[in-house]
Image: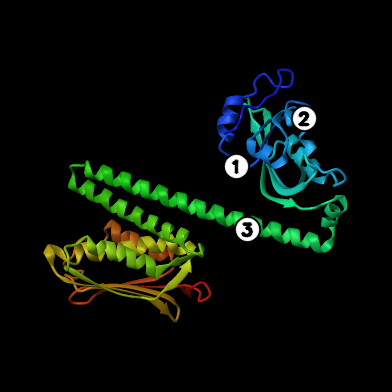
Amino acid sequence: MLAETHISPSDRSADFPEVPFRAAFQSLRLPVLIIDQSREHARVAFVNQAFLDLTGYTREEVSGRSWHFLHIPDMGMDALKAVDDAMRDEEAFETEFNGLRKDGSAFKCSLALSPVHDEAGHLRWGTLVLTDIVSVQHHDRSDIETSHHGEEQVERRNTALQTALDRKTAQLHEVEHRIKNTLQMTASLVLLKARRLRDPEARKVLQETAERVSALSAAHRLLSAAGDAGRFNLKEFTSELAGELVTALPSGQVELDLDVQPLGVPASKATALALLLNELVGNAVKHAFPNGRRGRLTIEIGRTENGLKIAVEDDGVGVDHAPPAEGSFGKTLITMLVQQLKGQLTWRDQKPGTRAEIVMPVDAQEMKFE
């Protein structure tokens, strides 16, 4: 836990919000400095324990000093000037930085600046966060200066690019995870509301909405769990979706036949495909086998000469006898999704049963076997 910042009354601004800062940064493992922008030379108003552990200083040794004490002499002032300029312009900024510990050892890191304004909108604080910290072993001034030369400079830049890529990938997975959790919570709330409604039609609408949200949640879960977050595994999603819908029926009523190639399609198509499959399979499960009618549900997904083909076929009561009527929201949604995917939709009366077939363009280079 972070100890309280010790700044003498003469060095501390009267409105320094010690408790909010302590609460906000006490659990962070990343080194953090808070810079008082109202004072000359941007002096340190707060540091957390992670910063003290990194640099070897005590809190008393850094409080009230210009943050420039971290800078390595003779290393050039470019990074310092860039950060100070960003502070003056009240802009967020990130740069590579070479820092100096109390014992004289050096470290490299990524330094991120975030301006903090008071309630009146005036710049009040600057937050400096250090990440991607790498120690420089057995250095001297000449060793550090050589990092500016060609070969080491290229290596450092490549490392920085890889670090940035890894960070962006981690952020993408985090976003996917949060979206999945939000969708799951939304589906749960909709179902909870549906159970409290007395109107069966309104309850049905909410239940179908929850099913659609759950399908989106499953798609995002599979994307975040995949090794390649840029691809959507159709076979895994279809197997899970169809299995859940069929098992909701009495045991043995509907036999499921899956003929799905292990294809991965671009993640940009995941949302539309997840909703489309949910509507096609859900429509067949709900309406093709009324009153306990037994039958078979077949799902085919595979490559075609021009892209991707999806077919959902049942041997149920057929389009002439199965509700809902043409123009229902489910079929309207299917039509809209097919148009969004630039595909072609065909409904066929199999006598008995119905077959919905969709062919859509997908570049061969975008679609691969998983």
At a point 47% along the width and 72% down the height, the residue shown is 362
Residue at image x 58%, y 39%? 28
Asked whether the beta carbons under mark 3 and mark 1 sit within 8 Å of each other, the answer is: no
Q: Amino acid at mark 3?
A: Leu
Q: Amino acid at mark 1?
A: Arg
Disc 3 element: helix
Give me the C-alpha separation between circle 2 and circle 3.
35 Å
From this viewpoint, which residue is outermost toward the bottom?
Answer: 305
Above or below: residue 151 compared with residue 105: below
In the picture provided, is 199 more to the left or to the right than 300?
left
Residue picked out by circle 2:
65
Which mark is nearer the camera, 2 or 3? 2
Residue 370 locus on image (x, y percent): 46, 73
- Which of the 4 quarters of the picture holds residue 278? bottom left
Of the image marks 3 and 1, the number of the one nearer the N terminus = 1
Identify the mark at residue 48; answer none if there is no mark. Answer: none
Q: Nearer the viewer, residue 257 or 302?
A: 257
- State the quadrant of the N terminus: top right
Tell me: 318 left or right of 311: left
